[in-house]
């Protein structure tokens, strides 16, 4: 329904051949396939309503029909293999090194940790469960901010030690305020920044800066 999708569907009508490409596996629900399928194979996939009814497991929740599931998937698979190629990263990017996941323990003062646990117990107590949902959400949000504050000093030390090795680093954070703190703290490493509210051009400039500028050692972004 976006303007870009509507415009591209119109353009596709006068383009002899279209290839829809995605680097993200569409694994959660058939609804994700519709736009590309209707462009690539309009003769096979020409009726959105019929597609939803047949393959998207329509469910009425009392407020309307939702199409968040999958149905008749073997039949859909038979249609997809006629117009779709799937290649895993292992098949097409064999030169990539294996992914390594490592948990880095961070030191936190015992007194601060005790205070956090006390707040946590209060946030998830029986009284909280009986209270308003908004109040509970606020308490959880406060806990998340507190958790960050507890590890901030050790985390920044780890980041600076890593950057001193000369390698570049991608940093991701949930909260925009944390992204801004990291960006300001790491000014010595000529950081790049990507977060919500930036234009497409600004994001692209930040990406190019991180990749192409040897002085830019770190990029900080929202998850």
Image (cartoon, rainbow, N blue to C red):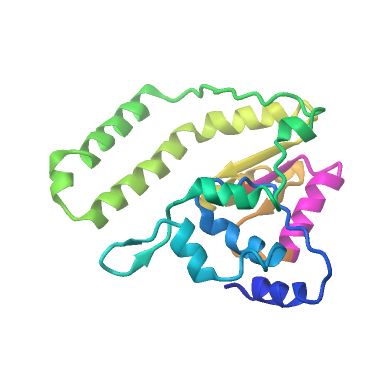
Q: Which span of residues is magenta-colored? A: 201-220
Q: Residue at x 46, y 60 (%)?
A: 54
Q: Residue at x 73, y 30 (%)?
A: 90
Q: Residue at x 63, y 49 (%)?
A: 221
**x then y, percent, for residue 37:** 65, 61
Check if residue 52 falls in the magenta segment.
Answer: no
**x then y, percent, for residue 109:** 41, 24
Q: 149 left or right of 218?
A: left
**x then y, percent, for residue 112:** 36, 30
Check if residue 216 falls in the magenta segment.
Answer: yes
Q: Is residue 222 among the parts visible in the rendering? A: no
Q: Quadrant of residue 108?
A: top left
Query: Between 143 and 89, which is closer to the camera in this rendering?
Result: 89
Q: Quadrant of the N terminus?
A: bottom right
Q: Is residue 154 among the parts visible in the rendering? A: yes
Query: Between 177 and 50, which is closer to the camera in this rendering?
Result: 50
Magenta span dominant secondary structure? helix
Q: Quadrant of residue 154?
A: top right
Q: Total label count?
A: 0
Query: Between 106 and 73, which is closer to the camera in this rendering?
Result: 73
Query: Between 219 and 42, which is closer to the camera in this rendering?
Result: 42
Q: Residue at x 50, y 48 (%)?
A: 73
Q: Is residue 188 above or below residue 59?
A: above
Q: 55 left or right of 117?
A: right
């Amino acid at each position: 329904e976006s303007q870009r999708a509507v415009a591209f569907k119109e353009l596709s009508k006068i383009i002899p051949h279209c290839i829809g490409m995605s680097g993200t596996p569409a694994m959660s629900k058939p609804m994700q396939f519709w736009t590309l399928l209707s462009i690539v194979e309009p003769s096979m996939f020409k009726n959105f309503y019929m597609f939803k009814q047949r393959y998207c497991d329509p469910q009425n929740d009392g407020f309307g029909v939702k199409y968040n599931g999958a149905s008749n998937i073997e039949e859909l698979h038979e249609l997809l293999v006629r117009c779709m190629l799937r290649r895993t990263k292992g098949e097409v990017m064999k030169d990539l090194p294996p992914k390594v996941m490592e948990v880095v323990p961070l030191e936190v003062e015992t007194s601060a940790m005790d205070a956090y646990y006390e707040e946590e117990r209060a946030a998830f107590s029986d009284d909280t469960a009986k209270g308003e949902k908004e109040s509970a959400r606020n308490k959880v949000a406060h806990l998340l901010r507190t958790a960050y504050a507890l590890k901030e000093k050790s985390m920044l030390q780890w980041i600076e030690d890593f950057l001193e090795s000369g390698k570049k680093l991608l940093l991701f954070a949930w909260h925009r305020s944390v992204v801004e703190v990291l960006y300001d703290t790491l000014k010595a490493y000529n950081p790049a920044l990507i977060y919500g509210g930036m234009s497409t051009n600004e994001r692209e400039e930040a990406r190019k800066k991180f990749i192409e500028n040897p002085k830019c050692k770190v990029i900080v972004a929202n998850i």
